[in-house]
Amino acid sequence: VVLMRHAGSDVAEAVVALSDILLLAGKYDDAEAAVREAVAASPDSNALKKLQRKVKQKVLSAKMDADADDGRSPGTFRWPLSVPFPKFPPHSSEQQTSKSTARKLLKAITDQGWGPYLEARGGEALVKVAKSEAILLDGLSFPLSLAYALTTAGAAHYAPSFGRLHVLVLGATARAEVRVWLQTKYWQELTYLLTGVFEPEFHFIGPELDAVEGGTVHPCTPPCAKTFLEANKHMTEKNTICAIFNGGFGNFVSSGQEGLLWSWLPDLEYLNGRNFLSLFFCANDYADLKGEVAVHAGLLRSQFVVAPRKNPFAMATVYGDGEGPSKGKEWFCGNSFMYAICGTTLASSSRPASFEEDPKKREELISKVIAVANTNGEVEVAATDPPMLYPVEIEASASESKSTSTAPPSPPAMTPQKKSSNNDGGAEARITGASEASSGNPATEKAPASPPAPAPAPVQKAATPSASQAQPPSLPESMPSAPSKRPSVSEASPSVPSKSAAATLVHAEVSIIEVEGVLKMEVELPGMKDISSGELEISDNAVRLHNLPGFAPLEKAWVSPVDSAQAKASFSAKKEKLVVKAPIASP
């Protein structure tokens, strides 16, 4: 009443003053109640409705900050524990077993982002929930960003045999990735989308985790990746991928605080040395992405499988100083950008000695990275082909999972593994060399004696991120617009390792990929210059190749039925490769 008298007849001004006082006093519920009562008394007041939305946002921000103040890094997922996740519509039992239904939904994972996916997944009802409850998109951003990277962005190819792929979420936190895992079924959306491709087996690993029963959550002291993988030798670069969500180790180019960088560097070096496919997601471009690219290009000499690009499945919640990215102010939005790395062009003898703690040497390394980060326009990076992954047969991995464990908290000092063939290409990351074929079955769970050397890495120019490019999705009145697309580093298929001969017959190596509804089967026939003496049969379900001198009979099933009437086959004597293409049959 006093405030209304002070403000005269302007009810909205009085309620603004009252709500500000209550918010300052920490009376969040009272502030919302006061505004709610005012709106109920004056339902036609647009000013009060606008105030109600503003107060709701202020209350949520205050609760987020209070809930995040527990001594751990606040991260990009700051929803209070009191805020529940919206229920996600479950797949019917028929949908859960239908490869064709899953493929249709996977086709909605595009550069257009959230809109097409939500429409395909739950129609207007789900779109409405997403617009009103941003925590839905923030939680789903983790699995859908992975789905986008592993399929549409072209980060990997997959062997045709269905099996389990280990997915290591490195740097995971209890308040973000693991909270979504424990309280929702959101992560299982990745499992459904990749039905028929592989079944992900999740492991959440990081220093800011609490012990949870079930063998999926692994509290671990840095270097986390090395610690965990050294304790689980069956996880190799052929059957395991790593995901790092909003790692933040590049932010030092803006903040000047290098702690996260030194914490992450030993693991980044280890993953590169072992040729693990690593997928990175960043919260902004002017600091996080810019700094991370500089670390990979100027220090680690990493090979990019997917060049830095906007992630169309970024979180919806944008944190900042109220000005937003358009004015160049500080902001962050989880998973806004992405890129993928696999291997390095550095010879092991040229790598920094585990980034020792000598202040002068650290200063030299930082200066080197800063120089790359401050490059105007473009940064030269090494590019490589997407790796071929070999998911492990479910029967085999069922027994192996019992032995999965976390290594002791005090790991031995890291000694990078040497590659059998690799050259340091100098300051511009230009290298020469050839990849070595691995022998045996890559789908087995035995760790190789040493990782294969990377393929020759052409020089690729990556655009230097700038704040003016950043347009992260805002808390929606409408769905976030489609991001601009940047090309991946390479569209070429990877070279496939050849298997050693069994007895006197060679078993041809086969890979299958899908490109815009057409299945492409490539059969490696080393030493073969003419296949006219063989018998090639193409059916809706399989390809058979018999009576080829020196080769064992081949019978390979398509990953899904095709229209064999439209199939085409070609053989290249130069490449020693048979290619069969056929459109996927209509459901």
Image (cartoon, rainbow, N blue to C red):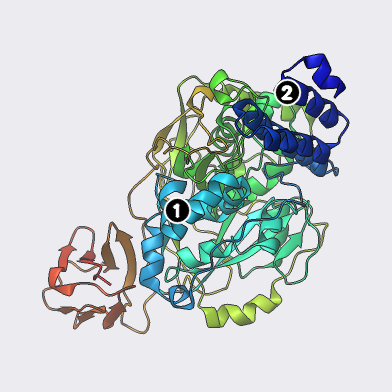
Q: Nearer the viewer, residue 557 or 453?
A: 557
Q: Nearer the viewer, residue 83 or 557?
A: 83
How busy is the neighbourhood of tag 2: few (under 14 within 10 Å), some, or many (20 plus)? some
- In the shown orientation, is residue 204 left or right of residue 237? right
The mark found on residue 124 in the picture is 1
Task: List x then y, in percent, for residue 18.
Answer: 81, 26
Image quadrant occupied by the C terminus: bottom left
- The amino acid on which the numbered mark 1 sits, given as a three-letter code, is Glu
For residue 285, side relative to residue 575 (left or right) = right
Task: Please tell me whether residue 234 is drawn above or below residue 175 in the rendered image.
Answer: below
Tell me what residue is drawn at x 61 percent, y 64 percent. 185
Kindly identify the residue that appears in the image at 67 percent across and 68 percent down. Answer: 232
Dot label at residue 512: none
Residue 8 shows in this picture: yes
Q: Marks 1 and 2, how far apart in space?
A: 37 Å
Which image quarter is the N terminus in?
Answer: top right
Q: Identify the secondary structure beneath mark 2.
A: helix
Residue 212, image x, y percentages: 78, 66
Q: Which of disc 2 and disc 1 is earlier in sequence?
A: 2
- Total labels: the figure holds 2
Mark 1 or mark 2: which is in front?
2
Task: Specify the amino acid type for callout 2.
Answer: Val
Tag on residue 11?
2
User: Dividing the picture into quarters, in which one does residue 280 lie?
Assistant: top right
Who's the residue at 86% across and 34% down the image? 26
